Image (cartoon, helix red, strand yellow):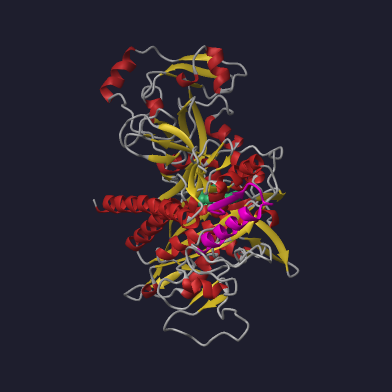
Amino acid sequence: MWFTPPAPSRPQRNRPATRPTGVSRLGTVSRQTTWCDKLSQIPRRGHRADGGDGCVRGRFVPRHGNVPAPPPRGSGRCPVPPSPLGKAKAADVRWSKALIPTLKEAPAGAVAPSHQLLLKAGMIRQLGSGAYTYLPLGWRVLNKIVAIVRKGMDDAGAQEMLMPALQPVELWKETGRYQTFGDLLMQLKVGGDQTMALGPTHEEVVTDLARDLIKSYRQLPMTLYQIQTKFRDEPRPRFGVLRTREFLMKDAYSFDANLDQLNQSYDAMYEAYQRIFDECGIPYVVVEAESGPIGGDSSHEFMVPASIGEDVILQCPASGYAANVERAAVGALKLPTQTERVARAAVAPPFEKVATPGKRTIQEVSDFLGVTPDQTAKLMVFLADGAPVGVLIRGDHEANEAKIRRTFAAETVTPADAATIQSATGAPMGFLGPVDLKIPLAVDQSVAAMEKVVVGGNAVDLHLTGVVPGRDFPLDRVADLRNAVAGDPCPLSGQPMIETRGIEVGHVFKLGTKYSKAMGATFLDETGTAQEIIMGCYGIGINRILAAAVEALHDAHGIVWPLAIAPYEVILIPLKVSNPDLMAVVETLERELTAAGIDVLTDDRDHQPGFKFKDADLIGIPLRVVIGERGLKEGKLELKWRHEKEADSIPVEGAGAAIAARIAQAKHARAQVLSERRAARAAARNA
Ligand code: ATP
Ligand code: MG
């Protein structure tokens, strides 16, 4: 069952067998009717809107005027099996019979709030390092996310399929990723001596499919997707289900005949992602991402802002620019003109050689010479497509390999080994500098902006002070070569950028022809000429959304689920379960709310009210309904939204309809906001 999520939970049968028959205020529901009968009377989720025949959770639901051959008598089963990930009917569950093992304390070792809360709320349970069980509540959330993601993909015109997680390693060798993925790729022997990989992603498998099945431009454009378990031997699985070794991903792949088509496919996925994350009700920011060495001229990540996020984001409040630190550009600095440089160089004293015995690091050299790290510069040696190159960065900055790769127009850039460094500069690491350097040199603009700088002397235990850029080393290749930091100028507005952290929940990526070239996936264009298929890939971490939602939406008492992905929308809390009058009200509410398509959890445990309130807050169900003896005497029930402080009361008479109306209003208000956002995006696109 690891390869695809199983069916959503079955209709709940854990209520007492003696549950009385009742007449709903929202629609007549007899205990004798079948699920299908009930559902055909009440407009609900899960039904086809076109009035055609529908299947609801494996039961057959005939619709007016379109009655197909009936299913075998007495079976009551739908002839078409339900989608394993299809939308569940509204559920009503009694806590006393459910597996919701809430904890008082999070187990030691859980650091991230989402990890602690998901464990405490009885939603997940760890099996091993990077491997988690999703208990019923957690699984319900995952299924709701899956349903939103699936709808987003389907609406964008992508076609769903399922590829195997078990992949021949030969495919990985064809693209060279057998090496580059390295230890991340989990491998196992099957059938004796064949080596297979457990798919960490599916570009190879889908390209193999495309080279067999896509032959003509007439088949393009096409976007395929799947929702599949991925395996990555993450060196540091952590933060609960934020980074695991086995996780659910929605991965989509676009196939296009030309760049125009690719741009359209990419834009469609980008918009679909915005709709999906909007729909899930989580905060997110879209950031420019590094697109890697080959093909991609564009890549964006969808980040949920969170202090424990592993990605650093640079944002400009003035222009709206946002980029992953791996990508973020530093706005152009004002550099001295050539005339100013010459004038300065003429009056500046020559640089001095200073013995710095055993002082290798920037901090050691700065302390020894009585300067600050930002008055120094470090020379780093890289191999650009195998050839050594020097890169000069300010002492307090970090080099950015992607920027270096672009500056040297190389496909790959890797740090040079000690022997290469020694032969290229004549010195070991710790004493390298740009003066009289014999290999190509690129200088970061922050260094080029300095009047003088401390650098290594290319000899053991030697540094140079008072070195003047442009006079003592060349400035032929000045570029933005370092990671941006807070306060750096935005590349669009020039205003200072701010630094935040985020959790990557999705990634869209123009691949170009990287995979089709490596694997020979071609199509015949209009002239009958073979062309490589242009591809894009688009991933969403389903489990990550669950954890990121908790990370972003919680308070001191527990999780605050958005309505769209909450495991249940309403929690009913009877304060005295031994009181039959009170429980009769509960049962009516359960029936009416589920008939209205609302997922209901009833806390029917015989516990103190305070205990139940705490648990309700912990698991984060959006709307709490308290049914107490005193309230009933006054003919009232108490309602409270999880995200609000104040409770409010409604009459018992008509309570089911009133609660259903509140939920409907909340959904409507949200839909309104999302439709305004979509309209604003469309207007921006057309502008
Ligand atoms: P990361 O940088 O976090 O390792 P990635 O960039 O390698 O992720 P992608 O290959 O872009 O990940 O995968 C698509 C999506 O799958 C990611 O945006 C993320 O949401 C999710 N994902 C990736 N790795 C993991 C993991 N180990 N556990 C859970 N979700 C993951
Ligand atoms: Mg990614």
Where does the image place residue 313, in percent across and percent down from the top left?
45, 38
Is 418 drawn above or below residue 464 in the view shown?
below
Comparing 664 with 237, the one in front is 664
- Residue extending furthest toward the front: 633
Total marks drawn? 0
Left-right relation of 520 to 19: left
Q: Which quadrant is the N terminus positioned in?
A: bottom right
Asked where in the image residue 92 lies, by quadrant, the reply is bottom right
Q: Which residues are magenta?
A: 567-595
Comparing 592 with 633, the one in front is 633
- Residue at (32% x, 51% y) in the render: 676
- Residue extending furthest toward the bottom: 69
Left-right relation of 509 to 9: left
Where does the image place residue 13, in percent across and percent down from the top left?
66, 65
- Residue extending furthest toward the left: 687
Is 391 drawn above or below residue 34 in the view shown?
above
The answer to whether any part of residue 642 appears in the image is: yes
Residue 584 shown in magenta:
yes
Where does the image place residue 622, in percent across and percent down from the top left?
52, 48
The answer to whether any part of residue 201 appears in the image is: no
Is 280 drawn above or below residue 87 in the view shown?
above
- Residue at (69% x, 50% y) in the render: 605
Residue 16 shown in magenta:
no
Where does the image place residue 210, in percent across and percent down from the top left?
48, 70
Left-right relation of 453 to 461: left
Comparing 425 with 505, the one in front is 505
Is 34 drawn above or below residue 336 in the view shown?
below
Comparing 494 with 90, the one in front is 90
